[in-house]
Image: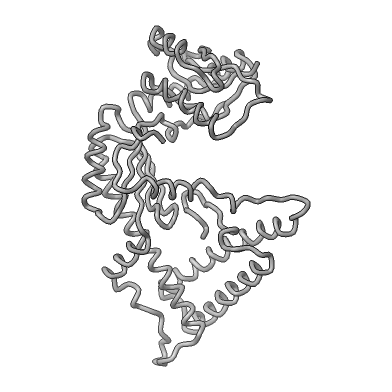
Amino acid sequence: MNDNKILFNTGSLDDLSQEVAKLTDNDESKLKLSPDNADSGLAKLVLTLIELIRKLVEKQAMRRVDGGSLTDEEIERLGETLMKLELKMEELKKHFNLTDRDLNINLGPLGDLM
Amino acid sequence: MEKLIYALMSDYAKSGHLASLISSAKGISDSSLYVISGGGLNAIVSDVNKSEFVADKSVAIDYANVIETFFTHFSLLPMRFGSIMESPEAVKAMLENNSPEIQQNLGKVAGKFEFGLKIICDSEILKAKLLAKSDFLSKTEKPSDGQTTTSVFRDYVNKKLAEHRLEELMLAHVETLIAALTASLGSLNSINKFRKMLTDNTIVDAIFLIDKEKKSDLIDLIAEIQNDNPGLTFFLTGPWPPYSFVDVTIK
């Protein structure tokens, strides 16, 4: 970017570059399928979708807890379910040698998944 | 040979000035530029061999620079990078078939520039500040039967609930900031688009379409809002061609 395009700036250009890079350099989130990595490539795609759904479920659940509409028993059950889902995801990520960054996708106006 | 299209403008554009710019400017790979007209519109194009066209970063920058050369002089609609048509006739037909929609978009951006604003924070510091101001997170879900000990599952819910509430606090803070920006920008008659919470640190990514002569008013206004939010970093950039305000589906 030309310096004369920056009209007002209260930070360092390094900060800006880093943030722009985060928004544009999403190499880890790309699906790279090839004959050699068909298993892990597919696992990455599937786990990303599962993680997206898990996060949405968790968010909705917290809204319900916050809204006070759940009984004690329901909260206990919810906690157990969410905890087991998270542990299972960790297991699967470990099994396929994937990290949170690998499963991150940009959801456009909603920001990053993770 | 195929035609690479850079931008569209009204054919009312001063022809003498346009002709001199066309003859002095160069397209990508040092190609010659020329104009194809149709439907009351001009398209700035250059010859390109589609099979040899490389859509890499440096070509994209060259492409953007061609658009920049013209947008400071004329109201135009920048084309998406890599817009290629097979012949001059195809370009002319595209202009004629889409003329009303393109003219309408040109009317929207006439005499205006696009500006971009990124508001960046240190998310940990901002979260700590918001937490200090709020007792929101101290309310955890306790069993209603008076038990004092909680289970591991309830602790887990409480942890997730705290994270959820902190996110909601951040979101509310960002919404307030956007509301302040929108209210202030009202005086500039701008068209605004906002995206929020793009990363942990980039909490607002805004674009504005504003009259050319209001550029300095915009800078003053952003400086004022920054003064009210000393913990946030503001980057205002521009003027840009109206990349984010073109809404034409080519038929």
The picture places residue B122, in percent across and down from the top left corner, at 36, 58
Image: B173 above or below A68? above
Residue B93, image quadrant = top right
Residue drawn at 41 percent across, 87 percent down: B144
Name the residue nearer the viewer: B246 or A104: A104
> For this view, does A13 lie left or right of residue A73?
left
Residue drawn at 38 percent across, 42 percent down: B193
Residue drawn at 44 percent across, 32 percent down: B243
Image: B176 above or below B191? below
How many numbered marks appear? Answer: 0
Residue sitting farthest toward the top? B16
The picture places residue A43, in percent across and down from the top left corner, at 69, 60
- The image's colour scheme reads one colour
Image: B36 above or below A58? above
> For this view, does B247 lie left or right of residue B165?
right
The picture places residue B64, in percent across and down from the top left corner, at 47, 28
Residue drawn at 21 percent across, 50 percent down: B227
The picture places residue B72, in percent across and down from the top left corner, at 36, 22
Image quarter (top left, top right, bottom left or bottom right) of the N terminus of chain A: top left
> For this view, does B177 lie left or right of residue B1?
left
Name the residue nearer the viewer: B55 or B17: B55
> For this view, does B170 lie left or right of residue B198?
left
